[in-house]
Image (cartoon, rainbow, N blue to C red):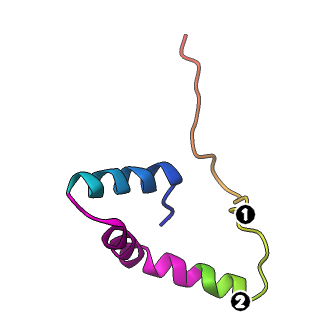
């Protein structure tokens, strides 16, 4: 699952409003994204250099139709 920077900041904002400190926010966030982090560690260990997502083939994310 991909979590955007905006979503990360929204999570942190809500956690702070709930009284979480920096260490609690970090540990909860890392627990939630553990599988994603492990996947990226593996990619970098295999020689990947880019931190950007690769372009995928297939359907576009959105479709625009002009209705008359």
User: Which one is closest to the eye, mark 1 or mark 2?
Assistant: 2
Give the camera-side residue of 28 and 20. Answer: 20
Q: Secondary structure at mark 2?
A: helix
- Residue 35 position in % (x across, y down): 46, 81
| Image quarter of the C terminus | top right
Q: Taken as a whole, is the magenta stretch helix, strand or loop?
A: helix
Q: Which residues are magenta?
A: 19-39
Image side of residue 11 versus residue 4, left or right: left
The answer to whether 29 is drawn above or below residue 62 in the figure is below
For disc 1, the neighbor class at 10 Å (few under 14, some 14 to 19, many from 20) is: few
Numbered disc 1: secondary structure: loop
- Up/down of 24 relative to 39, above or below: above
Can you give x and y, in whole percent of width and height, for residue 55 in the image?
73, 58
36 relative to 15, above or below: below
Q: Residue at x 63, y 46 (%)?
A: 60
Mark 2 surroundings: few (<14), some (14-19) or many (≥20) residues within 10 A: few
What residue is shown with label 1? 54
Residue that mark 2 sits on: 45
Residue name at image x 44 percent, y 57 percent: 8
| Disc with the residue nearer the chain's start (1 vs 2) | 2
Nearer the observer, 63 or 49: 49
Q: Does 31 appear in magenta?
A: yes
Q: Position of residue 50 (x, y in %)?
A: 77, 69
Residue 14 relative to residue 52: left or right: left
Label 1 to label 2, Cα distance in Å? Answer: 17 Å
In the rendered structure, does residue 22 fall within the stretch colored magenta? Answer: yes
**Residue 58 quadrant:** bottom right
């Amino acid at each position: 699952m991909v979590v955007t920077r905006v979503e990360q900041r929204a999570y942190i904002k809500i956690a702070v409003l709930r009284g979480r400190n920096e260490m609690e926010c970090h540990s909860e966030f890392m627990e939630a994204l553990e599988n994603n982090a492990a996947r990226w560690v593996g990619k970098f260990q295999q020689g990947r250099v880019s931190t950007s997502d690769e372009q995928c083939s297939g359907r576009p994310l959105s479709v625009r139709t002009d209705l008359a």
